[in-house]
Amino acid sequence: MTPALSDIDLARAIAAEAGRLLLELRAGQAPGRELGAAGDRAAQALIAERLAAARPDDFVLSEEAADDPARCAASRLWVVDPLDGTAEYAQGRDDWAVHIGLSVDGAPVTGAVALPARGLVLGSDAPPPLAPIRQPPRMVVSRSRPASECPGIADAIGAELVPMGSAGAKAMAVVLGEAEIYLHSGGQYVWDNCAPAAVALAAGLHVSRLDGSALVYNCVDTYLPDLLICRAELAETVLSLLAAHAG
């Protein structure tokens, strides 16, 4: 009998397989909304099947599936986004991702984030070592709805704003040393950040809400509107500026 995969090996395998499927689908279909919808459906079906087979007793919460309220009483919850950055995927860009995260008792403990167009899968088991921090720092922000706090904070610390697509792509830019700060407010859900948060925490980055509190998963409400992922050396400064902005 083949030994069961560990949680992280399972997360990595599923993220990689879903990424390959999405690339194959995109190679055979014209860009546009129909491609994005097809990608969402195909990746969701694959991930649901793989998790049901490998972890039949665990609950799964996905952007592309109905929520089962019974999950709220469970210790273990897989939180997945089959295609994070659907618009970027459908436009032929590379800043989209697949998120396979596992929360245990509300904490993001295991995660794999695939960046299929770049041939990468980053996991909470072996994130890359952090590169030397760059000055001035780079702050990745949403292409479509950058946080209102970002310009003021960027001015205060001399940061360069770098627009980018999916939440996973932005978070992994900090993990990979391609940026130093990812700050978002104004709307995310748990599937947007569970797997990225697990990888970022494992890499030694600061991960929190904008008020400095921890990200908590498996709540009744799936809305988790804001987060900060940044180099630990910058966290106190950024959080202080955020507090002043909020005050």
Image (cartoon, grey):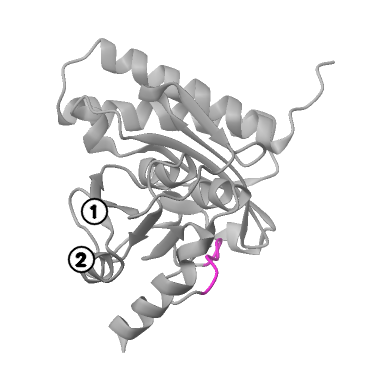
Q: Characterize the local packing of mark 1: few (<14), some (14-19) or many (20 or more) Cα atoms within 10 angstroms.
A: many
Q: Main secondary structure of the magenta part?
A: loop
Q: Is 9 positioned to the left or the right of 68 in the image?
A: right
Quarter holding the N terminus is top right
Where, by quadrant of the figure, is residue 227 drawn?
bottom left
| Residue 194 location (% of width, % of height) | 51, 52
Q: Which residues are magenta?
A: 213-219
Residue, disc 2: 151
Which amino acid type is marked by label 2? Pro
**Numbered label attached to residue 58:** none
Horizontal and vertical percent position of residue 92: 21, 24
Q: Residue furthest bottom?
A: 247
Sequence-earlier tag: 1 or 2: 2
| Residue depicted at 16% across the width and 22% down the height | 31
Q: Which residue is mark 1?
A: 161
Q: Secondary structure at mark 2?
A: helix
Is residue 137 rendered to the left or right of residue 113?
Answer: left
Residue furthest to the front in view is 135
Q: Quadrant of residue 55?
A: top right
Q: Residue at x 45, y 67 (%)?
A: 221
Question: Taking 214 as reference, is 144 left or right?
Answer: left
Vertical position of residue 106 compared to residue 81: above or below = below
